[in-house]
Image (tube, rainbow, N blue to C red):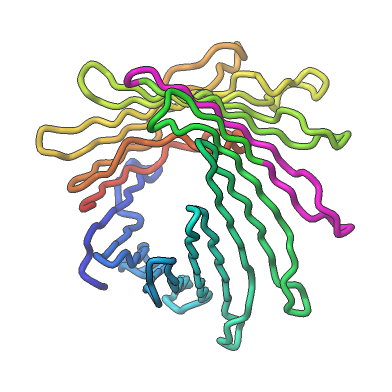
């Protein structure tokens, strides 16, 4: 393995309470990443390796090639993917990014698999991003299968508020595009506190877009200097009938506390409160589901997501991660 610029180790606790290393990720100075896991014999075996290199670069853009190799349990390469990303900058500040994905077949030949074209334009405080995703059909030709349009007004890093609107269209079995999703994000900043209202819409049984789930995300600083992010999730409760199951039912709240130690390390602890089975309007006691300890250059605080997916049930307590390096 290349000498790591940073390394993260994930630990899991088994049913007997034993804490063992499950996987690790090494990142070198060039941004190449290697994901390792424990094999049947207890030795480290690769799961995935990613290497990137700049093919060309100039004032008008650059071309980057990324090779990703995924491995089987015995250490053999099972999938190889090659992505070529061509970013072109225009004099007016807009840009076009073409990403072409090639995937290796069983004979080791690289076949064209997917291509995305992302065009970004800026006018005043409004940013518009249009993306077209095409995939290879049976005859090998690319066919558009998904279109996305994102309009963002305002910049939360500069302004007190911002609004983002995303429209998602997908190809149906009849070869026609239909609106598959609509996502909105409204952010407001007051002092050290940022509040985000996130909504996710999907077609209902009539084909009309209907609210599917919501999130309210607040990010703030505590008196001790730690950073706190609360994510309250609303959606449809599986225990309610379809006729009485609005998408604004309280489901759970996730709290992440990020605290810096005297030695420069950062501990990030995430706990979850789920709706009480006896009272669908009340959250239960918090349960810690994950913890990350980071040393080195540990980055910034958790960021608010720009889209929301239907909420899922919380799984068993997640592993503890120990991260070193940037």
Residue 284 on the magenta segment: no
* Residue drawn at (45%, 27%) of the image: 254
**Where, by quadrant of the figure, is residue 263 drawn?**
top left
Report whether residue 195 is seen.
no
Magenta residues: mostly which secondary structure?
strand
Nearest the camera: 216 or 118? Answer: 118
In-front residue for pair 14/103: 103
Above-or-below relation of 35 to 287 = below
Number of marks in the rendered image: 0
Residue 187 is covered by the magenta coloring: yes
Q: Is residue 237 above or below residue 122?
A: above
Residue for point 61% across, 32% down: 184
Q: Position of residue 46 (x, y in %)?
A: 38, 69
Instruction: Look at the image and give the residue range highlighted in magenta.
Output: 167-192
Task: Quadrant for the N terminus, please.
Answer: bottom left
Q: Position of residue 81 (x, y in %)?
A: 52, 73
Q: Viewer-proximal residue, 18 or 324?
A: 324
**Foreground of the two, 105 or 313:** 105
Residue 12 appears at what percent x and percent y? 35, 47
Specify the quadrant of the image occupied by residue 44. bottom left
Please give the name of the residue rendered at 30% of the width and 51% of the height, measured from the top-left corner.
20
Q: Is residue 54 visible?
A: yes
Q: Position of residue 57 (x, y in %)?
A: 38, 72
């Amino acid at each position: 393995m290349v000498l790591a610029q940073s390394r993260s180790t994930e630990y899991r606790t088994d049913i007997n309470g034993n804490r063992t290393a499950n996987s690790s990720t090494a990142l070198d100075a060039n941004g190449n990443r290697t994901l390792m896991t424990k094999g049947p014999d207890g030795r480290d075996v690769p799961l995935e390796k990613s290497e990137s290199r700049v093919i060309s670069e100039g004032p008008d853009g650059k071309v980057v090639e990324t090779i990703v190799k995924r491995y089987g349990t015995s250490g053999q390469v099972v999938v190889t993917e090659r992505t070529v990303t061509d970013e072109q900058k225009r004099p007016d500040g807009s840009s076009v990014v073409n990403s072409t994905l090639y995937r290796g077949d069983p004979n080791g030949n690289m076949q064209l698999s997917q291509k995305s074209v992302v065009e970004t334009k800026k006018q005043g405080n409004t940013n518009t991003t249009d993306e077209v995703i095409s995939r290879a059909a049976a005859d090998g030709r690319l066919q558009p299968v998904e279109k996305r349009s994102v309009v963002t007004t305002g910049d939360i890093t500069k302004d007190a508020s911002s609004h983002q609107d995303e429209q998602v269209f997908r190809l149906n079995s009849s070869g026609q595009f239909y609106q598959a999703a609509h996502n909105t994000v409204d952010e407001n900043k007051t002092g050290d506190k940022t509040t985000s209202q996130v909504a996710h819409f999907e077609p209902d049984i009539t084909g009309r877009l209907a609210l599917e789930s919501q999130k309210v995300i607040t990010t703030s600083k505590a008196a001790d200097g730690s950073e706190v992010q609360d994510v309250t999730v609303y959606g449809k409760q599986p225990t309610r009938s379809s006729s009485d199951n609005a998408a604004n039912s309280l489901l759970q709240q996730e709290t992440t506390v990020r605290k810096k130690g005297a030695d420069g390390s950062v501990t990030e602890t995430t706990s979850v409160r789920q709706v009480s089975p006896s009272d669908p309007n009340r959250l239960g006691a918090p349960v810690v589901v994950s913890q990350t300890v980071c040393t080195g250059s540990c980055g910034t605080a958790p960021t608010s997501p720009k889209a929301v997916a239907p909420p899922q049930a919380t799984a068993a307590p997640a592993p503890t991660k120990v991260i070193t390096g940037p």
